[in-house]
Image (cartoon, helix red, strand yellow):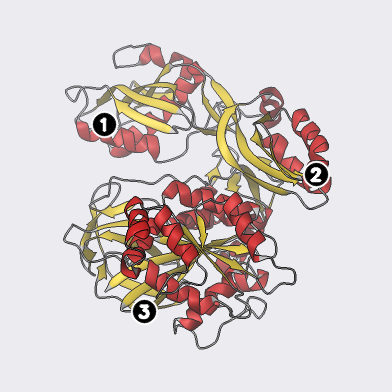
Amino acid sequence: MNNTTIGILAHVDAGKTTFSEQILCHAGVLRTAGRVDHGDAFLDAHPLERQRGITIFSDQAVFERAGRRFFWVDTPGHADFAAEMERAVTAVDYAVVLVNGAEGVQGHTETVWALLQSLSVPAFIFVNKTDRAGFDRAAALADVKRRLSGDCVDMDGFTGGPMSQMLIEAVAERDEALLDRLLSDGYTPDAWLEALRRQIDARELFPVYFGSALNDVGVAEFLDALCLLTGSTAPDDRPFDALIYKVRHDPQGGRLTFFKVLSGSVAPRDAVDLPGGGTAKLNELRLYSGARYRALPKAERGMLVCAAGLDGVKPGERIGAGHGCHSRFATEPMLAATVEWDPAVPVQRVLHALRQLEEEDPALNVACAESTGLIDVNVMGPIQLEVLKQLLLDRYGLEVSFGPLRVMYMETIAAPAVGVGHYEPLRHYAEVQLRLSPGAPGSGITFASRCHVDELALNWQRLIETHVFEKPHKGVLTGARLTDVQVELLHGRAHLKHTEGGDFRQSTYRAIRNALMYGGCVLLEPVCRFDLRLSADDYGRVMGDLTRMRAKLDPPALEGDSCTLRGECAFAEFSGYIADFMAATHGRGVLRYQLDHYAPCRDPQPIIEAARYNPLADDTPDSVFCSHGVGCTVPWDEVRNHAHTQAEW
């Protein structure tokens, strides 16, 4: 059966969940549509979602219509859960963007639209809440065209059959051959329908429909249009390849891995290639619809499937033929908080629970300081912290709180430096020599080997590479996560009898730390890209605020009585301005921002002093050498004098 995945996205409170309920009701999944305020929505089944009245976790429903199978994916609308939304979007074939007809295009709607553009996902638009007093269809369409795309086209309720003259011309304008036919032979429905589908798939045209989900106006027609205008995925003979887009845990703590089949097929008991090398056997395949599932004898191209187990794989990674590929997510937190709990509870218990939640949301980036036992998590905002607190209580029985939200800084190496890591207690041996150099902004950590296999066997070199990437490394200024660093393996040594895999873990960690002590670090701060819309009357005050924050501004765009200001600003400055902006614009302004890049911190010293970080007490740069049959610790600045590999410093 052909499979098509459709994701629903919107700004919070646009009516997305109510709309999904009506869609599923018309599709035959539900007998009656649930409601958010009644706490009985099919896709908001988690107690936290029903308690808060918002979508927190992406979820899916499955229905069959017109001889095809559809996967309907509901995603969070709140900005604090944008990372969850982005992971879900990687698995969709088409997106439905819901616009609040009463409010117009809102800030997060534009963020969603930019994400769809970056991933080249075809999109439909449904303008909701048209039953509100004062709704103006022409004004709403103009707002959508201005804020999202000039290629948004009013479909005039088209669900098949003859098109309106307006739609006929809109399709012909985007197809030169059709335009010639329109001027000569005239309109032919089949040719125009085929062209319309092609233009939607190519993101040359974005259909716009209107209605009211609460009153079930226009929803059935929209579902008919989706079935008519979306394509489908057919079986193919390519090998199995799948994208991991979600990880969950069942009530017993078992791991559930969700993936989209990109090509080929797979069945239970089949072995699949894993991202880190090796294979794993699939014990069970499940087809989920809401909280319910059924066992699946075979998963084919285009399906969203769950497998029990598959430990270690992460969202964004591939299994099967594309196991070497990995997707990077654009949504990254700019805030961090320290976890606080009863000292009587072992730190390992708290860390275990957070590690499981990190499997579900990799953006948490859980970090535990070895020297202090403090645990930090990265989050998008305060609502996510509240949800995290409740999840730890409900699932693990852990009562925690969080320290104040703070801006998440990073560090990079200041100058190229060579570090040596040696690990030689009794009956162990490994030495690694690494060069660390500043990398391109946004490049993260990269690895290359210049070491000849005659000096160090390839299996040991690959193990060193694994250890470089297996955990976040810390800078030496504040202990912030290291980024934008090129790591080169220069030399390495192993012992024929005494070297074990863990020895290279120790020596690799120590070599990285050793190089950082020589090269020093630069503190990096997050810089956000912002988009502000305000009345021309508020322009002067807001411009003054942005100037004081040392924001870099693009030329302002004036549109009648309103103004748009775009630019970039250090998030440490901008994060405290959000409430002030709304006050300055009397609640009428629209604000949108997201992480753009990390840049050297403009005033690092107060932050470094406040951190009081001791680089020698955490992730040691020292090495262990054997002396008279006993392992002895050698301080970091003396390691080079004892190294066994060739000197390149």
Element on which disc 3 rests:
strand
Residue 580 bears which disc, if any? Answer: 2
Residue projecting furthest to the bottom: 31
* Of the two numbered discs 2 and 1 in the rendering, the one whose residue sits closer to the viewer: 2
Q: Which residue is mark 3?
A: 64
Residue 434 left/right relative to 137: left
Residue 576 placement (x, y as % from top left) = 75, 41
Amino acid type indicated by mark 3: Glu
N-terminal of the pair, mark 2 or mark 1, is: 1
N-terminal of the pair, mark 2 or mark 3, is: 3
Q: Is residue 153 visible?
A: yes
Q: Which residue is mark 1?
A: 461
Q: What residue do we see at 35% from left, 69% from top?
A: 189
Given residues 443 and 255, the one toward you in this image is: 443
In this rendering, is residue 248 above or below 439? below
Q: Quadrant of residue 240?
A: bottom left
Q: Residues within 10 Å of mark 1 (few under 14, many from 20)?
A: many
